Image (spheres, rainbow, N blue to C red):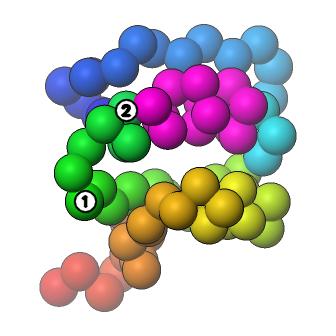
Amino acid sequence: MGAIGYTSLVLLDGTLNSARYIFGVLRPVALPFISALRNPTFQQDNARSYVAGIVRTFLDTENVRLLPWSARSPDLT
């Protein structure tokens, strides 16, 4: 997912919070796409709604492997 866009664009009404991220983006769009890949690793930035405990728990429950650093990590030198 990203600039090339292998999935549909998700439009959300209102502010993105962790619940909307899980039920509006991850569960209906990202998880089906990720589960169709072989040995995927998911990357996301440090937006508050992405790194909330409930989101991390959800991704752990769904066995989604995350990169150990964020997309905008200063350690990428």
Give the residue at mark 2: 33
Q: Are marks 1 and 2 in contact (CB under 8 Å)?
A: no
Give the quarter of the image for residue 3. Answer: top left
Residue 13 place in picture, x, y as percent: 77, 13
Pick the front one: 62 or 69 = 62
Q: Secondary structure at mark 1?
A: loop
Q: Amino acid at mark 1?
A: Asn
Give the residue at mark 1: 39
Pick the front one: 33 or 48 = 33
Going 35% across and 20% down the picture, which residue do you hit?
A: 7
| Quadrant the N terminus occupies | top left
Spatial separation of the CA atoms under disc 1 and disc 2: 12 Å
Task: In the rendered view, tell whether residue 24 sits above or below residue 70.
Answer: above
Task: In the rendered view, tell whether residue 14 sits above or below residue 27.
Answer: above
Residue 5 place in picture, x, y as percent: 27, 22
Residue 36 place in picture, x, y as percent: 31, 37
Pick the front one: 58 or 71 = 58
Q: Is residue 48 visible?
A: no
Magenta-tinted stretch? 21-32
Q: Amino acid at mark 2?
A: Phe
Going 25% across and 43% down the picture, which residue do you hit?
A: 37
Tell me, yes or no, whether the highlighted magenta stretch contains residue 29: yes
Tell me, yes or no, whether the highlighted magenta stretch contains residue 38: no
Task: In the rendered view, tell whether residue 47 sits above or below residue 32.
Answer: below
Pick the front one: 77 or 27 = 27
Going 62% across and 34% down the picture, which residue do you hit?
A: 27
